Amino acid sequence: MKSNTWIFLRGLTRESGHWGDFVAQFQQALPGSRVVTLDLPGNGALHGTRSPWSVAEMMAHCRAQLAARHMAPPYNLLAMSLGAMVALEWAGEAPQDLAAAVLINTSLQPFSPFWQRLRPAHYAALLRLALFGGTPLAWECTALRLTSKRGDASVLPRWLQLRQQHPVSRGNALRQLIAAARYEAPRSLPRIPVLVLGSEQDSLVSVACSKALARHGAYALRLHPDAGHDLPLDDGPWVAQQVRQWLAG
């Protein structure tokens, strides 16, 4: 079962617009691919929607979005962090929907301990923003610091514009954080083709989590030596080439 349709899913409080240049980079590496960027409930165009307390509900919402657009499966998924949890839940619940999945810098119970799933050094910063808020600039500077090793501040004006257009409420941010923390993957992982991509220098989530997922699922694994958590931001062409080579192999 093959498909040229790729569904992209972002992570915690991030939206379709945060893919930036990566969509074009991906389509250049995989000519003929159709990319559809979905927002999780509470983010992006859906910022007025209440974020669910569970990853399973997020997955169901994504399936409903595609059905409303009359887009029939099968699909390929490319998803990172919280979005990759949604992708894995999707593969377990409705494997007939999916041809393949690429999972980027995600972390899962029961395969990784909590201190690897979210590095303790960042608990205070994330909870402070989720519970008490902060200026848009504080939010986005923190996001860039935690997720990028490249630290390219040129993305900040665009990120601030996205936050102004689609503000994520503190309640939605907290619900997404709790849903991610509570999510437990099935111990018998789905048997669709999966590529796991991880960043050796991810300071938000330990790369050990990607290694554990690949080991437990017997999935293909590729590691970037110096990118941060937002791997498509730090080195989008590398991500696209890994996907291309994996599909060709």
Image (cartoon, rainbow, N blue to C red):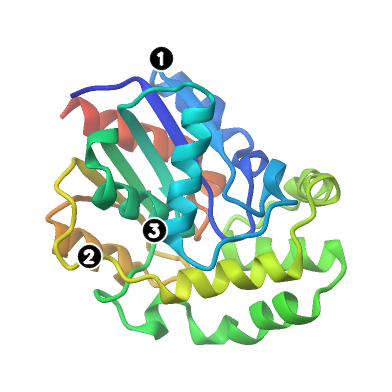
- Total marks shown come to 3
Provide residue 186's location: percent of width, then percent of height.
22, 65
Q: Which residue type carries mark 2?
A: Pro
Tell whether 90 sits left or right of 154. left
Mark 3 lies on a secondary structure that is helix
- Say few, some or many: other residues with alpha carbon within 10 Å of mark 1 (under 14 / 14 to 19 / 20 or more): few
Query: Residue 69 versus residue 149: which sits nearer the camera?
Result: 69
Mark 1 lies on a secondary structure that is loop
Which residue was labeled with disc 1?
31
Query: Residue 113 versus residue 61: which sits nearer the camera?
Result: 61
Provide residue 122's location: percent of width, then percent of height.
59, 81
Q: Which residue type carries mark 1?
A: Pro
Tell whether 120 sits left or right of 41. left
Q: Is residue 143 above or below residue 134?
A: above
Q: Which of the two discs, 1 and 3, labels the residue nearer the N terminus?
A: 1
The image's mark for residue 22 is none
